[in-house]
Image: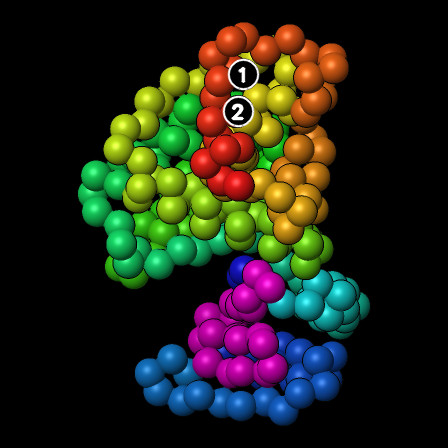
Amino acid sequence: MEIKFNISGINRKELVTAIGELVGKPIIYKGAPTFSYDVGDFTIDKSGTLLFPVKADSDLVSKVITGLSERGLEFDESEMMNKLSIEMPLDGFTEESIVKLEKLISSKASLIKKALGATELTIEKTAATLKFPWFKFPATSDEVAAYSQFISALCSAAKEQKKVTARDRVVDNEKFAFRVFLIRLGFVGEEYKLTRKILLRNLSGSSAYASFHPTKADQDEILVSEVNHE
């Protein structure tokens, strides 16, 4: 996660000092080559960008952002909202599996966007990672955990599946359709109950059969998925 502040080196120390006071941690100057400051889980780079991990304490992050704003250190909130990313290492990925990942995402693009409240599902590739900047901030620790599990499952499926079809289709019951997808990704059992709840909450319909009449193919798909992941 990163937040850009419109400051230069001359008043970066003001930003760093304020963060130190708000966090209550010592300020550590890293020197060359980064010329950054570390304050607990927070890093302030040489351009005045505040960086912190997506799993950082959301209450503390909110306290820092509010405190900086009260001190007149403003940021672009619209930009910040688009900067919450989940990153996965490139280890184990091939060009083919990255293409499969893109197809897998495309096949459920409409449902994923609605489930996450995302407008785009862009994947950013760096030298060592894949970035998924799909998520809004602030997010609770439970939400961050659910999002991280979802991205991890997508990546694992892309590496393991032999064939992926990139065909997004309109469904009558969004929750049921996405539940089938989550089961295929391995989200089965009590340990994933909260994750399923978070990922299904923005979708319409019901995840149960009671108000939805799936096709024979849908029934077979969910039964096979449940058996394979028990």
Query: Which residue is drawn at the image coordinates 27% and 28% (left, top)?
Result: 163
Residue 53 falls within the magenta-colored stretch = yes
Quarter-wise, where is residue 166 in the image?
Answer: top left
Q: Confirm whether the magenta stretch covers residue 116.
A: no
Image position of 175 (left or right of 47)? right
Q: Residues within 10 Å of mark 1 (few under 14, many from 20)?
A: some
Report if residue 71 is visible in the image.
Answer: yes
Label 1 SS: helix
Q: Which residue is mark 2?
A: 222
The residue closer to the viewer here, 32 or 156, is 156
Residue 173 lies, in percent from the top left, at 64, 15
The residue at the far left in this view is 95
Q: Nearer the viewer, residue 171 or 23?
A: 171
Residue situated in front as seen by the camera: 30 or 97 = 97
Q: In screen coordinates, is 63 left or right of 134?
A: right
| Residue 81 at x, y percent in the picture | 61, 48
The span from disc 1 to disc 2 (Cα, nearest Å) is 5 Å
Question: Could you tell me which residue is drawn at 63 percent across and 67 percent down?
Answer: 56
Q: Are marks 1 and 2 in contact (CB under 8 Å)?
A: yes
Q: Is residue 137 visible?
A: no
What amino acid is found at the position of numbered circle 1 in the picture? Gln
Which range is magenta? 36-55
Tell me if residue 31 comes above or below residue 180 in the rendering: below
**Secondary structure type for disc 2:** helix
The amino acid type of the residue labelled 2 equals Ile
**In the rendering, which numbered label is found on residue 27?**
none
The residue carrying mark 1 is 219
- The quarter of the rendered structure image containing the N terminus is bottom right
Residue 102 is situated, as x and y percent measured from the top left of the image, at 34, 34
